[in-house]
Image (cartoon, rainbow, N blue to C red):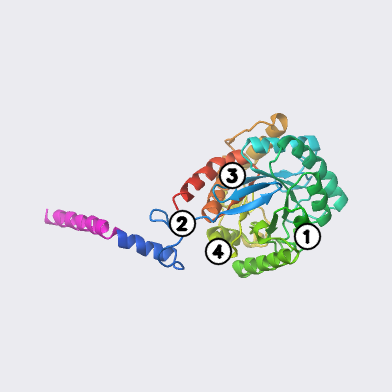
């Protein structure tokens, strides 16, 4: 009885002490989570241990677009025969336009149109071929989407020039002006926002060459160089968006390191776009693999072992999209991959992302809304 009584007293003391010292404990926790911040804990509320998201204003066409009040979704529309996820599905212009309209119905705020695959080991296509793929789609979307922003996803100044003239109003450069610095001048003349992505190497070699030893040093240097080139070409900083380029020349672990510390990009004081949709680094973790691939896959040569059921679910979903064009929601077999995508999106938003790039807006929209609700208390 004495032992039982003593145990109860200890428990009572622990509970009482926890209540009395809660304020001190909370402050200590905040200090351990945010050691770089000092009182008055700018950006950290009393109830949420996350950094608040900065707000920005972009000029997109004749409109001003606010970034930061809620997360915007950029719907992916690949007009290619060989993209890693949906290559060949929307190569026909009519089908691509219908898919673009569907993306908007599913919740996309912007549409990102690309005519050249940038998946690992892909090779560039000619300017003429890229224009042949994207121009009919951009013209068709502009006729039917009104003022909804359309981005041209290209690394070529000639393609961006023609696409902006056809109705696009944002330039998305996955090379961060490394492949064709003239893109910045094209965006400036058309008063179009410019998305600068971080990419190590080129798509055909980015997952084969050795990865950076310090990914944040690589990101910082890359963005400093890209921003400097853009500003030198006359771009206003207020029209620049940064994309850390998840899956582009990074190891699996480095992709998660970026997501875990995304708030570090706040140092640039620019809006952030994150694209994790259907990426292999998400698929691998969903499939039960670790952060560090086996030696056989250490250079990105081995794909994660997704179950046949998951693969069937994704393929089945694609065929249904082609047949009906309606929003399908989650299919049972592909649900694990979709949930993994949603989890990565939430991590990005809580890290400060203003825009998330997605193949399936309807699937991630609930997660986006929940993440935005969490941010609203920060």
Mark 4–mark 3 Cα distance, whole angstroms, equals 27 Å
Q: Which mark is residue 185?
A: 1
Q: Is residue 216 above or below residue 190?
A: below
Label 3 sits on a secondary structure element that is helix
Q: Which of the two labelled residues, at mark 1 and mark 3, occupies the earlier sequence position?
A: 1
The residue tagged 3 is 337
Q: How many marks?
A: 4
Q: Is residue 100 above or below residue 129?
A: above
The residue tagged 2 is 50
Does 165 sit left or right of 41 as displayed? right
- Residues rendered magenta in the picture: 1-22
Mark 1–mark 4 Cα distance, whole angstroms, equals 28 Å
Q: Nearer the viewer, mark 4 or mark 3?
A: 4
On the image, the x and y values in percent for residue 142 come to 75, 39
| Extreme residue toward the right, this view | 128
Mark 3: few/some/many CA within 10 Å (<14, 14-19, 20+): many
User: Does residue 211 appear in this view?
Assistant: no
The residue tagged 4 is 264
């Amino acid at each position: 009885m004495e032992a039982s009584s003593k145990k109860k007293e200890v428990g009572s003391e622990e509970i009482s002490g926890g209540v009395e010292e809660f304020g001190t404990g909370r402050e200590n926790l905040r200090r351990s989570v945010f050691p770089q911040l000092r009182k008055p804990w700018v950006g950290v509320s009393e109830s949420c241990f996350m950094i608040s998201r900065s707000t920005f204003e972009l000029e997109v066409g004749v409109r001003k677009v606010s970034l930061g009040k809620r997360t915007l979704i950029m719907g992916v529309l690949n007009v290619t025969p060989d993209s890693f996820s949906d290559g060949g599905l929307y190569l026909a212009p009519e089908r691509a336009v219908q898919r673009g309209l569907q993306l908007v119905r599913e919740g996309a705020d912007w549409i990102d149109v690309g005519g050249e695959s940038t998946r690992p080991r892909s090779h560039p296509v000619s300017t003429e071929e890229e224009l042949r793929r994207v121009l009919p789609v951009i013209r068709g979307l502009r006729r039917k989407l009104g003022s909804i922003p359309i981005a041209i996803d290209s690394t070529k100044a000639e393609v961006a020039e023609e696409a902006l003239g056809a109705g696009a109003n944002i330039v998305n450069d996955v090379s961060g002006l490394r492949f064709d610095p003239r893109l910045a001048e094209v965006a400036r003349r058309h008063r179009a926002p410019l998305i600068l992505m971080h990419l190590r190497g080129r798509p055909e070699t980015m997952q084969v060459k050795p990865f950076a030893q310090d990914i944040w040093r690589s990101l910082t240097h890359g963005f400093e160089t890209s921003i400097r080139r853009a500003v030198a070409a006359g771009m206003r900083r207020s029209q620049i968006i940064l994309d850390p380029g998840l899956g582009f020349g990074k190891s699996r672990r480095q992709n998660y390191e970026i997501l875990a510390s995304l708030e570090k990009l706040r140092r640039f004081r620019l809006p952030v776009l994150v694209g994790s949709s259907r990426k292999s680094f998400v698929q691998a973790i969903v499939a039960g693999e670790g952060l560090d691939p086996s030696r056989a896959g250490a250079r990105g040569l081995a794909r994660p072992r997704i179950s046949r059921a998951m693969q069937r679910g994704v393929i089945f979903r694609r065929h249904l999209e082609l047949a009906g064009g309606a929003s399908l929601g989650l299919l049972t077999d592909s649900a694990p991959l979709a949930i993994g995508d949603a989890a990565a999106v939430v991590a990005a938003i809580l890290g400060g992302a203003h825009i998330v790039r997605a193949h399936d807006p309807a699937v991630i929209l609930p997660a986006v809304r929940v993440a935005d609700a969490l941010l609203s208390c920060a």
